[in-house]
Image: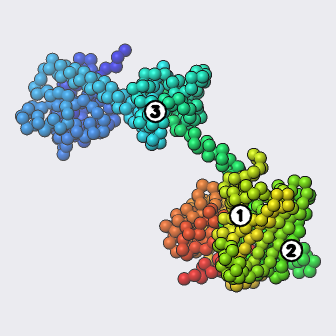
Amino acid sequence: MTPQPRILIVEDETIVAMDIAMTLRRLGYDVVGMAGSGADAVDSARRLSPDLVLMDIRIRGAMDGIEAATAIQRERPTPIVFLTAHADADTVERAKSASPHGYLVKPFDERALHRAVEIALRRAETDKGAHEETLDALWQSEESFRLLVNAVKDYALFMIDLQFRIVSWNPGAERMTGFQAAEVIGQPVSMLRPPNSDARELDGLFEEIRRNGGAKWEDRGIRKDGSQYVPHVYCAPMVDRKGEVIGYVSIMRDITEQLKLEAQLAQTQRLESLGQLAGGVAHDFNNMLMVIFSRCEILLRTLKEKDERRYVSDILKAAGKNRALTQQLLGAARRQVLDPEVVDVNEVVTSAIQLLTSTIGEHITISTQLQQPAWNVLADPGKLHQVLINLAINARDAMPESGVLTIETRNVHLDASYVRQHVGVTVGDYVTLVISDTGSGIAPEIRDRIYDPFFTTKEAGRGTGLGLAVVRGIVEQTGGRIWVYSEEGRGTTFRILLPRHAGEVTPEPGVEDQLPERGSETILLVEDEELLRTVVREVIEEQGYAVLEARSPAEAIAISRRTSQPIQLLLTDVIMPGMTGLELAATLIAERPELRLIFMSGYSNKALVNHASLPAEARYLEKPIASAILLRTIRAALDDT
């Protein structure tokens, strides 16, 4: 049964309103309400959602019928029929602003009322249908436009109908395939694939697209000139407002050259993955080392027995060696970016041999001839480790059965005669680092190419072709030079010259027992590693500070916002889930401008902790952090004016 049209009457004369209501009910309409003022009319229309409003133009209150009708239609499109006893030209003109569906001039009879109501309702239904058609057309247009806009520029973009025929073709598709739009529109999409392709593959792909709402894959394509290429394809269904699939949109990118480069760089990418793994392990390892250091330092301050203190000291020494080993591992994996330091090359060689002993195998003998003392050089110790490891691994591969690897250091002075014969060096003092093997040697015809990136004589899977290129880059960036001497069957010698530096060797940071003065300020500690957070909190609280601890940046922000007391310092890890320490600091500084900042990180890679991006007044500590250093840094940050 069709529901009766619902009508709202707006008339300030009660008798007139009741008469109209009675007539409408007799004609079969549902009168849902009557209002006597403009404000009542707007409120009733909002509550009742009528199908039609009969609106007297002149009604009581501050809002007349025209204003009330405008307000009603602003909230919800509703047909309006104006009732007026004064149909003057000015009133009719002003009433047009409300887009009425009809006028009735009082007095009117039942027939006129019926006719006006029916005309208004039918017009409203017609307008609604036209509006829906417009929305459908607009929606389809906007959907197509959205897909086009979201596609990456200059890619091949085209649409496909339900019969898998091409129905649109953009300039990017023309450039990629050589086919013009007139040549492909209306043709099956299979024409873009080689003739020997299995058509059932496309059937399965389109079924997956319909089922999953889209799919992407690497395909085989053929251009107009017959050449083949590899496109990366993304295809998604186009649907109408009812959710019915009406076609497909496809985006293609030519990745032929990219795949060639990927094949060339595959081994390098594996090395990068190893580096990322090493970096992640180092982060967690440094966190745990900090726990060990902190607990041992507390024990050393509390233990009295000599043997007990010696045991704890041994643990600290072992932890220190593990910290150094972690730095060496990162250097070997090319994940460590260190500032140049004044170093003793002999110490670098000695520590590198600890790694080489297990790396190159027992069938190779390592011999060292280190001049004592060797002059100091200004270099990145991690990079020097990498140089030694790369050259030692090359030597190992040249001695598959057995052999001797010799590492020498010598202090030398280069005079003018030597400089004239060797490009790239100047007169002065140098430390020579010589790495020699008794292996197969390097053939003369490839000797000039050994430093070329990606050049390798090893079979697939046994070399990246980057090792010697990296070695030369490190040496030259350090200000040194490298030369190679080799004979087939008699081994190879690499000779590296590093300029002497007059400065003193940079000391290894040690554990200092002297603590700064105690404090009473409030510190917000943010660290996602629970065990480490507990240790740091205890160290800080033992020094007199009040600590608010948070497991995540989100929790830290919540603590700060609900804490009315001053917070003088933020001590936060840099890399945390959801938000970095830098982002957290920026958020808190905006709310607490006087907050002092100290950042911590277990990552040694400055690419992860870019000091240039730290606020100028912030301090940075690299884990593991000795308790005394942590407390002195906190005190310095709080006292800094």
Q: Quadrant of residue 537?
A: bottom right
The residue located at (58%, 32%) in the rendering is 219
Spot occupied by residue 412 in the image (x, y as percentages of width and height): 76, 80
* Residue density around tag 2, few if under 14, some if 14–19, many if 20 or more, within 10 Å: few
- Residue found at x 89% / y 68%: 367
Specify the quadrant of the image occupied by residue 16. Answer: top left
Label 3: how many Cα within 10 Å (few below 14, some 14–19, many 20+):
some
Please name the amino acid that badge 2 sits on.
Gln
Residue at 30% from the left image edge and 39% from the top image edge: 75
Q: Residue at x 39, y 26 (%)?
A: 182
Q: Which residue is identified by label 2?
A: 369
What's the amino acid at mark 3? Answer: Gly
- The C terminus, quarter of image: bottom right
Alpha carbon separation for disc pair 1 and 3: 45 Å
Color style of the picture: rainbow
The residue wearing badge 1 is: 471
